[in-house]
Amino acid sequence: MTAADFSDQLKTLDATLRNIEAVLDLDKLQRDKADLEEQASAPDLWDDQARAQVVTSKLSHVNSEIDRLAALRGRIDDAAVLLELAEAEADPGALEEVGSELTSLHKAVEEMEVRTLLSGEYDSREALVAIRAGAGGVDAADFAEMLLRMYLRWAERHNYATEVYDTSYAEEAGLKSATFAVKAPYAYGTLSVESGTHRLVRISPFDNQGRRQTSFAGVEVLPVTETTDHIDIPENDIRVDVYRSSGPGGQSVNTTDSAVRITHIPTGIVVTCQNEKSQLQNKASALRVLQARLLERKRQEEQAKLDGLKTDAAGSWGDQMRSYVLHPYQMVKDLRTEEETGNPSSVFDGEIDEFIEAGIRWRKQRELESEPS
């Protein structure tokens, strides 16, 4: 490419970043930062630990957004300076360096642009993720455990805090189900496109005849409730059962009746939590999961009224959305967006950003297409 081509690319990147700054409202982010810093410096902040955690989490998120925008702006400006020097000195090496940086910048700006597509009512929330083994016996349970590791590794790569609330282990291998939280702003909006049925095709390691096995696991993503959501759960509407935790655990986790199962009688929703040592901690965590499920139920009912028909939410258990094929060839493919890769091992190690970004763009396009003209 010529210097003129690179100059055009820089202008496009600059315009895109200016649009991102406008949509994310950089001025408001700066004001929010100042307000949150003032709250965080209050001497009595940690008297209310729940509120303190909310404030510090929001401040960390705002700082991260501002820093990312500033870093991208700085890189674009530096690339423009380097391009001028390369042209002035007719230096092909410097020109090649500009091209390499522009390729990297395109990817970084695209990733930031995806954030502007997260404008749903609950998109800015933290996320609760539930994984359940589906059809496929022990292979499905093993697949559910592979998906749990995949999402936890993804969160780890992004330095997002996670908390596992419940893991129900299968008898032979793997998991019957697992529920965990991703404690980062916009985790729900980001991960919500992962809801649905995931399919694995491979030679079963549990089949002594080495036959190919197809197994399924369901992923459900819910927004974490906040105090403004008004999800009231009367005591008379729930039944609380306690029992002894099962599966791997530390001291006292498996030796006391600390696990909690809550049944919401009006809806039949059942949630469990067994990963904390304290019965009270497990009950509190289970109630948070129940509130999230009831909030999602309420959201779906309201959407159904708006649509004038019963909703079939994306992410329902019958909504097959991605295939992971390990035999007879290697491929992971999203059936909605057509995004695919020939490296399943990297996907199972948490490298799923390209699938998530493609899913967010696909969802936004569907929303635009469904809007009345």
Image (cartoon, rainbow, N blue to C red):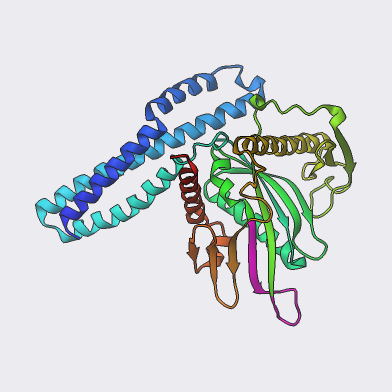
Which one is nearer the viewer's eye here, 195 or 273? Answer: 195
Task: Give the image location of residue 55, x and y in percent.
Answer: 56, 26
Q: Is residue 239 magenta?
A: no
Q: Is residue 163 left or right of residue 103?
A: right
Quarter-wise, where is residue 171 in the image? bottom right
Q: Is residue 181 left or right of residue 41?
A: right
Asked whether the viewer can see residue 252, the reply is yes
Q: Is residue 237 above or below residue 16?
A: above
Magenta range is 197-212
Q: Is residue 163 left or right of residue 262?
A: left
- Which residue is at 80% across, 60% downward? 170
Which one is nearer the viewer's eye here, 216 or 29? Answer: 216
- Which residue is at 87% across, 37% downward? 240
- Which residue is at 44% across, 36% downward? 65
Q: Quadrant of the N terminus?
A: bottom left
Task: Give the image location of residue 91, x and y in percent.
Answer: 14, 58
Q: Is residue 214 above or below residue 263?
A: below
Question: Number of marks in the image?
Answer: 0
Task: Give the image location of residue 254, x and y in percent.
Answer: 85, 49
Q: Quadrant of the C terminus?
A: top left
Quarter-wise, where is residue 72 in the image? top left
Outermost residue toward the top?
43
Q: Is residue 290 left or right of residue 93?
A: right
Task: Give the image location of residue 176, x and y in percent.
Answer: 77, 57
Outermost residue toward the bottom?
209
Asked whether the viewer can see residue 70, the reply is no
Which one is nearer the viewer's eye here, 1 or 231? Answer: 231
